[in-house]
Image (spheres, helix red, strand yellow):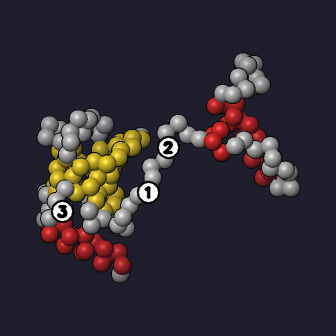
């Protein structure tokens, strides 16, 4: 196979070659669904290089809107948005990349929302995209005030 724009040969096993082949096959099937599907590549052929995060959650997540918090790793401090919460976890988004490179735990607090207690969290996963870093974390020794905050947010969603 060669790339049409520049006639550069592509190896038959390259990722771009497999993606182009899969796109062609899906396009053909969208035009004529009766085409055989035996020429499709195996699912593992197009697997991303980074596996998607596995959802091993033991508690449901409650989405939170328009709640900003400050996050510090003991050295840097930044503003983040709470994406969702659970009784023992929190997901923060729009964090700067340098935050929490070597820190074992982070501190989350809010100067705008007195109902949100100071939290000490331990990051479990992170993902970086063009908006910044998103992290999922477990709350270390969740205080009773956190349970009250979680219950209040959950009851607002249920209404």
Q: Name the residue under label 3.
A: 142
Q: What element carries label 1?
A: loop
State the separation of the CA atoms marked 3 and 2: 30 Å
Q: Please state if 1 lies on the left or on the right of 74 as rendered.
A: right
Q: In which quarter of the image is the N terminus?
A: top right
Q: Is residue 126 visible?
A: yes
Q: Name the residue under label 2.
A: 51
Q: Residue 55 carries which label?
A: 1
Residue 92: give x, y in percent of width and height.
30, 52
Residue 62: give x, y in percent of width and height.
35, 67
Q: Is residue 92 visible?
A: no
State the separation of the CA atoms marked 1 and 3: 21 Å
| Residue occupying the point 74% across, 37% down | 21
Residue 116: give x, y in percent of width and height.
17, 64
Is 76 in front, or is 56? 56
Q: Is mark 3 on a helix, strand or loop?
A: loop
Would you place residue 90 above or below residue 95 in this image?
A: below
Q: Is tag 1's residue or tag 3's residue first in the polypeptide sequence?
A: 1
State the separation of the CA atoms marked 2 and 1: 12 Å
* Pointers 1 and 3 in contact (C-beta within 8 Å): no
Q: In which quarter of the image is the C terminus?
A: bottom left
């Amino acid at each position: 196979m060669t790339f049409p724009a520049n006639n550069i040969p592509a190896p038959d096993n390259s990722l771009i070659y497999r993606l182009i082949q899969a796109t062609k096959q899906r396009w053909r099937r969208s035009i004529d669904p009766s085409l055989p599907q035996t020429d499709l590549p195996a699912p593992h052929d197009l697997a991303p290089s980074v596996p998607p995060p596995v959802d091993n959650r033991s508690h449901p997540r409650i989405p939170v809107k328009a709640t900003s918090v400050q996050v510090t790793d003991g050295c840097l401090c930044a503003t983040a948005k709470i994406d969702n919460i659970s009784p023992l976890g929190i997901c923060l988004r729009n964090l700067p990349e340098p935050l929490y490179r070597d820190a074992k735990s982070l501190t989350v607090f809010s100067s705008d929302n007195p109902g949100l207690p100071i939290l000490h969290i331990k990051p479990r996963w992170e993902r970086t995209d063009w908006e910044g870093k998103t992290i999922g974390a477990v709350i270390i020794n969740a205080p009773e005030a956190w349970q009250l905050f979680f219950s209040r947010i959950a009851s607002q969603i249920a209404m």
